[in-house]
Amino acid sequence: MSLPRISLLGTTALLFEAPGGLDLVTQQRIWALARIAQRWPEIREAVPGMNNLMLTFRTLPHVLSTLNTRLLQAWNEAQPMPLEGRCIELPVVYGGEGGPHMQDVVNHTGLSIDDIVALHSAPTYPVYALGSHPGYCYLGGMDPRLATPRRKVPVLSIPAGAVSIGGSQTGVSASAGPSGWSTIGSASMQFFDPHQTPPAILLPGDSIRFRVEKVIQ
Amino acid sequence: MIEILSTSALATVQDLGRLGSLRYGVGTSGAMDPLALRAGNLMLGNDENAAAVEIPVFPFQIRFTADCAFALSGADCAARLDAQTLLPWSVHQARAGQTLHLAPPQSIDAPALLRTSRAYLTLAGGIDVPDLLESRSTQLRGQFGGHEGRALRKGDCLRAGEPGIGKRAVGFGIVPPAVDMPLQVEGMNAVRVLPAAQYESFTEDSQATFWSEPWKITAQSDRYGYRLAGTTLIPKVPMEILSHGIVPGVIQVPHSGQPIIQMRDAQPSGGYPKFGTVIEADMWRLGQAPIGSQIRFIKVGWDEAVAALAQTQDWLHELRRLIELQQWSHGRA
């Protein structure tokens, strides 16, 4: 079995990468490791990514190897932590004006629009991590047949609620901004409110189901 | 207390950044030159994390609508309070009705190496905007924080935390950190870099080039990131990386082979190969590097990076001591 990898992000943070590919059980161990490391006094924040964990420093560890050893030991002991999250159902209008890149996904996958909608709306997607922009959820579990490479030229701005595919991942934009992913539909939901605690509506362990509201051919 | 008179956009309210909400997808924001922000706050007796106005586009003008002490730091902008010329990195008392004017940063009489690009206007008690997720910095992507979650516009009014005529000493200045702690290679501004996870995955030629050649900060550079131009960096094999947390200072190399340094408004996650990370101690140097200028990278290890941070802390410590002395002699006068 290959070993986890620890690397530095300058003097601001370190990055722990779990061995192997993306799957829910590994991600549940990442969540467990995050919960442990968040309690360490030199750590400001433990930030789960996809199959990895970033730790930002509150104070600089003078000897890095001590922290690395403690981290590896915690990983070895970390048990998958299934979080009992909420499941949010999100109505989506697929295709049309709100899904300007549907045709690109059709062209790349060779599937029809109806097939794409059926495959995309079938699973319950667990929220693996948050990142990119406030409230944005990285989701696991997209059907691999839908995988479409990132766009060669990123789109300058896609609106909040854009449902899009990037490589083997899918997600919903929480606010307008640039994106290299292909947008296949649109949903309306407020994912983030800085006045709430926590500010993000969905957290790791929660999940999303896309309900087909309409398909525009 | 102050009213923005300039139409030039992009000035924002910033403190030292929103450091604890990365796991909600919230990037740090914060001052591009955190040392200038701290210095401005110290001169006024503020909390070092108090919010100030970061000004990247000139000329810039404001009017004081009430008496208020203020400090200027960062870029040297030949500041004038009405007709009075002000030195850079100094603290003053403004009266209601006075106008503060900042000109484009000057390079005359200063070596080109000391050209800078961002000025900070700090008010007594800090800029009074709401604290959201433990910071007053403007989160542009999330459209919250700072002043209404956006860049300042003509007509905007900002309040100071402690307006009026203060009891503290004003009318003194300090020596900028670029003079006290210069860092150059062959006449170019330099920053120190710790190699990151994919450093070894680039060709040996690319690794050598990165440290030995100048990198131009292109016009496509802003608070989100600095896009650099130089010799193309080539990976040994193409890489696919899962999305993970990143921080300001991370140097990503997208498919074009031209590096991008993540700056304060960068998103908190990414998946491009990481060549290295500019160390925290040198982010202020980068924050002041003008568009079009060339920079050099210096390779360091962990111990040197830690020592660099200690040097910055020593500089701040000495600054606090000097300012205390100033206040002490003011109290006796």
Image (spheres, coloured by chain):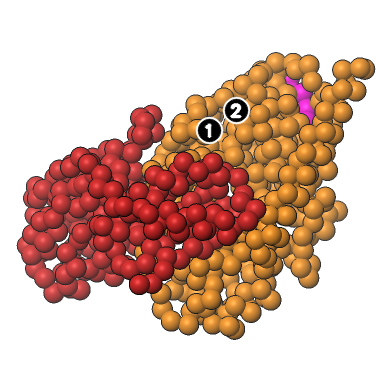
Residue for badge 2: B127
| Tag of residue B136 | 1
* Place of residue A22 in the rendered image (x, y in percent of width and height, measured from the top left): 29, 63
Of all chains in the rendering, the one displayed in red is A
Quadrant in the rendering for residue B332: top right
Q: In the picture, which quadrant includes the C terminus of chain B? A: top right
- Crowding around mark 2 (Cα neighbors within 10 Å: few <14, some 14 to 19, many 20+) is many
Q: Give the spatial CA distance, label 2 vs label 1.
A: 9 Å
Asked if residue B94 is among those painted magenta in the image, a careful observer would answer yes
Q: In the picture, which quadrant includes the N terminus of chain B? A: top right
User: Would you say residue B220 is visible in this rendering?
Assistant: no
Q: Secondary structure under badge 1?
A: loop
Question: Label 2 sits on what residue type?
Answer: Ile
Left or right for B126, reference B78? left
Look at the picture and state if B241 lies above or below B135. below
Left or right for B8, reference A110? right
Q: Identify the mark nearer the N-term, 2 or 1.
A: 2
Of all chains in the rendering, the one displayed in orange is B
Q: Which of these two is toward me, B253 or B22?
A: B22
Quadrant in the rendering for residue A170: bottom left
Q: Secondary structure under badge 2?
A: loop
Q: Which residues are magenta?
A: B91-97
* Place of residue B169 in the rendered image (x, y in percent of width and height, measured from the top left): 82, 23
Question: Label 1 sits on what residue type?
Answer: Arg
Q: Are marks 2 and 1 in contact (CB under 8 Å)?
A: yes
> Residue at position x 67%, y 39% from top?
B37
